[in-house]
Amino acid sequence: MHETLDETLSALDDLIDDIYDWMIKRGDYYFDLKSNEELTARLDDIEERLIEYGDATVEPLKEYLHDTETYAHIVAAAVLQEIGTPAAIWQLIDAIESTDSKLCEYASEVLKSIGTPALQPLIERITDRLDNPAVDGNGDEIGILYTLGVLSEIRDPQSFDFMVGLLDRFDDGMGSLNLAYLCSRIYHQHNREIIPRLEAIAEKYEDNTPGNVAIEANGTIRHLLVDRILESEDWMIYGCCYICEDYDKHEKTCTASGEHKSYDSFCIQCIPEKEFSCELCYLKRFVTSPDDPYIDGCDIDNLPPIYVDLEYSHNQGDVIEEFEITTSYRNKGLITVEADSMELSFEFHTVDDLNVLKEFFEGAGDYLVGGIWFFIDTEEIFDELYPEAVDADGELIRRDDGSIVAVHKEDRFELKLVLNTDTIENLIAIIDTQRFLLLCDTHSYIDDFRERRDKVESDIRRVLRLGEPAEDSEEPEPEGAPPSPPCDHEFKLLKTHKKYTVYRCTKCGETKKEFA
């Protein structure tokens, strides 16, 4: 080396000043390495020279690492990551105990990138903080949550065994807040061997303990069981960016398409890394007026529809109309292909029902009957034959061109709805989505979500001084109970079509349609 470390650090000072000036000139406080080739080339050269000095660089970089007002901390963290020696790791561990949240977050990500070599220093720091409590410059006790959080995300038998030992230690009186946090973080080890231990903890603790130990333990158990579902096959579902492994949550970009998307964007090629968290979209609902108080966000009962143009034929000719594909399982599972004039629905109750439906759409067999029904409201055709609309069974028939025709036949008329190959692809994704939800046992999750949702609605209604909606009564009758008396229905508007209106009973959930 032809220059000293001090000279390299001086060059780094000049570079940091130039980067800062360049960002100020652009009015952009983010330095994109691709945006200035000259500065990037200088940065690469200086980082390479600093790395060559090894441990001699570590102590001088401390000042740069704690400078989060400029680009200095990013350079220092990158160099320490590449050096990767115990001295460099300890410097980063000190940083994640800083009161500067930006520094803590950045150093945490670097330690996770270093991985296994950082485990033993992290274990030693956590153990030392528990055995020998210390305070920071403000007199506040230095906790272990950040260091434990980093450790938990380095998946390794050493970190798993240490965290299991901490479970025992915290369970013996070290505080329920630490125990609750540990129960939530041990999930990142993705080791289902911990489930029996978590079940014992959940049974021991009440939900009203500080930190909600039982809730966190049960949540981790649930996530570990969902992992088993995720690993069971190569899922491709109709899902949102928030649950998709192809979504960069920091850049808000789909890494598969390269497009910028919000987390609640849906597509039929979602590869889920976790199950739906629909309260995120649901809470986007907002109040418009007392007469029309809610605009629905996404929830598991109300996934966004898929729109398709489909051809259907009857005794008087062919028609092309826009249909929407929707799903519902409030009372029973339905996948519905719906337009103003017609509905085609597939009913399901179990994963096996969905398996049969999926296998047919993928090419198994030439016919499928059962659990398929039409609702038809084409008054120009049927008014003379039927004073009201037709509600009838149907069947699916496969064509040689790959399309599938939904058919209903009677002596007086025949109705056909053509499901083209694009629509079939959409239906397969939707069927797989329902399979995924049922296999993840999402209904139990939904119950919790609905409780939170109802509380939000109640709070909004109270603020707007709106009356409370009538209570649904969908609880099953206890075994051996006498039959319930017929429901004295109280129907409430559910949805409106051009030619009919749908109402649902607020007591029993039964629906009815009234025609204009």
Image (tube, grey):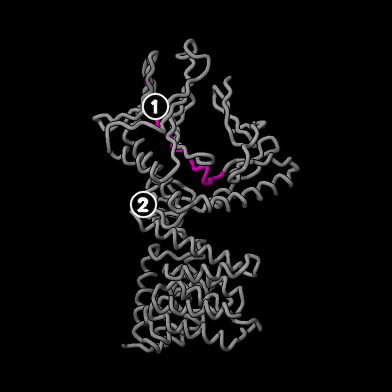
- The percent position of residue 177, horizontal first and vertical second, equals 61, 73
Can residue 18 be seen in the rendering of this structure? no
**Mark 1 Cα within 10 Å, few/some/many (few <14, many 20+)?**
many
In this view, 173 is above or below 339: below
Quarter the C terminus occupies: top right
- Residue 307 included in the magenta stretch of the image: yes
1 vs 2, front mark: 1
In this view, 236 is above or below 101: above
- The percent position of residue 17, horizontal first and vertical second, equals 48, 74
Q: Amino acid at mark 1?
A: Gly
Identify which residue is drawn at 56% across, 67% down.
202
- The percent position of residue 421, horizontal first and vertical second, equals 31, 35
Q: Amino acid at mark 2?
A: Trp
Q: Is residue 277 left or right of residue 352?
A: right
Quarter the N terminus occupies: bottom left
Question: Which numbered circle lies on residue 235?
Answer: 2
* Residue extending farthest top: 384
Q: Secondary structure at mark 1?
A: strand
**Mark 2 Cα within 10 Å, few/some/many (few <14, many 20+)?**
some
Disc 1/disc 2 C-alpha distance (Å): 29 Å
Extent of the magenta region: 297-314
Can residue 424 be seen in the rendering of this structure? yes
In this view, 510 is above or below 256: above
Residue situated in front as seen by the camera: 7 or 453 = 453
Identify which residue is drawn at 38% across, 39% down.
427
